[in-house]
Amino acid sequence: MMRPKYSLLLLSGLLLLPGCSYQQASTARPRLADLPAFDRSILQSDAPVSEQQLDQLYQQILTLQPAAETRQKILYRLSQMYTRQLEQAELPADQERVALEQMVSRYQQLLVDYPQDPNNELIRYQLSRSYDLLGQQDACLEQLDILLRDYPSATFSSEIWFRKADIHYSRSDYPLALPAYLAVLQGSDAALKLHARYMAGWSYFKLQQFEAADEQFLRVLDNSYTELLATGSEQPQQSLRDEVMRTLSISLSYQQQGASLQALLKRVDYPGGERPLPYVAQLYQHLAEFLVTKQLYTESLQSYRLFVADYAYSLTAAQFQLKLIEAYLQNADATAALAEQQQYLQLFGPGSVFWQRASVVEVAEVGPYLLQYLDYFARQAYNAALKQKQDSNSNGMADAENQPELLFATAIPLWQDMLSILQDPILAQALPQSVLQQYSQADLRYLLAESYAGAAQEEDALALYTELGYQANISDASLFTAQDAAYKALLLSQKNLQFANGAQRAWQQQTQFVTRHSQHPAAQQVALQQLQQRYNQQDYHAVLQHSSAVTDWPHPESSQVSLENEARFLHSQSELALHDYAAAERSINALLLQILPAERRNLLTTQLASSIYQQAQQTNTPVLAVQGHLQRLLDTLPDSAYHQAAAFQQIELVRAQADYPAAILLLTAFLQRYDNTERTATANAMLLDSYEQAGRWPEAAALLLTLAKQGDAEQQREAQYLAAQYYQRAGDIATALDSWRSYANRYHQPHLLAQEARLQLVLLYQQQQDLYRQNFWREKIIAFEQQFAEQGNARSQQLAAQAALDLGRHNSQLFANVRLAHPLAKSLQQKRQHMTTAIKQFEQSMHYGIAGLLSEAQFQVAELYQHMAKAILESDRPKTLDELALEEYQLLLEEQAYPFEEQAIAIYQQNTRLTQQQLWDSWIEQSFQRLSVLLPAKFNKTESYRGVADAAY
């Protein structure tokens, strides 16, 4: 590397020496003579004298051989004058060298002649300068070393150290140059310190101690910048600053470039406390620009990036960030450029530290870029979200990577930041109008609302849509209309009904929309929705009141017939719900005149039938009016769902009027049409009842049997039982007998009804005087009562007791009809057989203990015994017996008859004892009568049995 050309030139005018004063002289190359001569200001004279005059005067004095002291002073003064004249003279090189050699001889002679002279310090100093000008650096160094040795506290020791260091540096002896430069730094000469520090930095650099070199360079810049701030002028130090800047950049380029600069600034304290930001920015920028010249583009950009990272609150950082963006754009690296643009937004956008601290002017400078980048990234995220949403809708489902909500959410803060910039009244005045005119605040707010909605931030979206739809000034909107925004607000409010006050807000949105934006294509539909909501809330009066808001739409040219019909439909449904069936009938008839879908027409037809039918159900409606409604329904809507109910109600009305023949006709027709409905069974029952009320028993019985075939076994049994009764009532004995016989043979259960059926058979056979069949069914009654004794009751027991009694009577009659004739044994056996059977049957009757039947059965048994005794006594006598034998035969018969009579008496007595159980009837009375004959001594007393009889009652 070349020796810095500024190190000596900038020292001119700074060095002050006592003694004479010399004007500055400059040469074409840096050398020791470039330094200024001694300051002559201390030598004052009253009258100006030229140096030639002084020289002549001093020479004249010397010829006079003055005193030694005077001579010494004159010689020293002449040496100074000659040195000054040499410095001011512009001599050719060879003449100048000769003059310098003469000067060296004079200085050397003075030092020899006057070794202790106080001015020798200056003489040696001038001698060192002369050696330097002659290029005799070793001789110069020797004199400098003597000065530093003999005069360590000299006022110009700093300069001496500097000259020594400069010589070592020029010889590339950096280890010796460095401590000499550092020694200058320990002195008090501020000007020399500045350059010594600079050269110390170079020395460190040459020794590859880059961090130490950087520190020296930075301190040079710090000091010069401090002086710049103090003087307000850049010119005195600018060339030095430029050179040091470049040198520092070179050193940093050998290290970690920007990172090394960043570490250096943190390591070296600034004299004033904190380095001024413009100065720091200059360091980073100078480094970045230098790195570009070395084609270290990435490192150059990193320098800007590091400054931005540390000083993001500054406008300069924003400017540097733009340099990064521009660099990437020039290199066609769009990805990196976009990343830096996003970084720009993050560091300098609204809400950043920069934004909070920056002035209006600074914010106005970054504002256009912020708006540009915000708009780009917001639209990019928004459009990507729209595409993903479209893809999701087309696929019918969303996958994990396809999440438009996240992209919409990404766009939201970007739109918000744009609006915060554009809506700031102070900033709006600072920004150029050309920038403001590029963006529509209304469109941005609409896009923000759309993004809110897409990100499922529906409360925010609803509020913004509402504002855009009803309150905001959207004169500059190009993406939407107030109607569009209002409709979006409406849709959102309807979507979020589950939120607090969701239904109320949705209703308000609907009302506002219909009122303010009735020309919107969906407005009439919204009005219909409100009507539907009223209907769903069962506010039917409100539906009737507001249905005209849809049917009488204020814009007839855009009114939709389908919506009008739907409103009319809700109107009719509300009338039905309010039970205003007459009005509903009129509304439905009007609707049926329109072109309607088949399903709706079928429903209305059914409801028309219902409205007519319900009019027939109204309380206090006259019967004739009810019949009129029903007949109108049956005539006009024969296929309606209410036809069955109407026909059935008509039948009920006719039956209520006891017009059973007419009811039978209507019921027959009803059952022919509705043979298998929930009313079929009731209708059959009503027809059966009508047959009964009309006395048409055969038809009733036939209907019963027919119905029984369709039912289960139990129903068939009941039908068989009733049919038998109906045939019996009709006087159709033969059919009745067949029905009862069929029932008795098929159904032994329930036991009680089966016994009643057998009883009816007995009674019917009695009417036909068919004794055999009477007794057959009497025996059945007795047998089944014995078989199902546990299921019997008083009634069934009475029937069995009566049957047994009747059978006993029958056999008693057979017993009475047998006459005891010869041969007596044969007739007696036959009579005994009938007697035994009768007694057994009477005993069966008595077994049930039925009061009225028990007394008769016991009486009949006693009668059998009494009759047997009498029959024996009155039996035929053998014709071959003589009188004695006949008498013996009579005694024998009496012996045979006596037990029977005794048995009869005992049974009669047993029968009379029933009075002790508070019983009395004709059979007990007859028992007393029989006993009064058989035992007159005991029972032929009227008061005896009558008293007993009275006691029984």
Image (cartoon, rainbow, N blue to C red):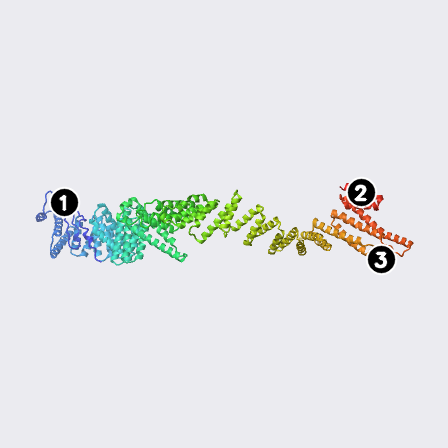
From the viewer's perspective, is 608 left or right of 819?
A: left
Q: Position of residue 80 (x, y in %)?
A: 13, 49
| Callout 1 crowding tier (Cα within 10 Å): few <14, some 14–19, many ≥20 | few
Residue for point 77% across, 45% down: 922
Q: Position of residue 353 (x, y in %)?
A: 32, 47
Question: In the picture shown, does residue 139 fall above or below 536?
Answer: below
Question: Disc 3 marks which amino acid?
Answer: Pro
Q: Earlier in the sequence, mark 2 or mark 3?
A: 3
From the viewer's perspective, is 138 left or right of 446?
A: left
Placement of the C terminus among the 4 image quadrants: top right
Camera-near label (2 vs 3) is 3
Question: Disc 2 marks which amino acid?
Answer: Tyr
Q: Which residue is mark 2?
A: 945
Q: Which residue is mark 3?
A: 823
Q: From where the camera sits, is residue 319 visible? A: yes
Question: Disc 1 marks which amino acid?
Answer: Leu
Q: Are marks 2 and 1 in contact (CB under 8 Å)?
A: no
Camera-near label (2 vs 1) is 2
Q: Position of residue 164 (x, y in %)?
A: 21, 54
- Residue 43's label in the rendered image is 1
Residue for point 78% across, 44% down: 925
In this view of the protein, which residue sits in the foreground, 772 or 395? Answer: 772
| Callout 3 crowding tier (Cα within 10 Å): few <14, some 14–19, many ≥20 | few
From the viewer's perspective, is 205 left or right of 80?
A: right
- Distance, label 2 to label 3, CA atoms, is 42 Å
- Distance, label 3 to label 1, CA atoms, is 215 Å
For label 3, the SS is loop
For label 1, the SS is loop
In this view of the protein, which residue sits in the foreground, 72 or 513? Answer: 513
From the viewer's perspective, is 939 left or right of 381?
A: right
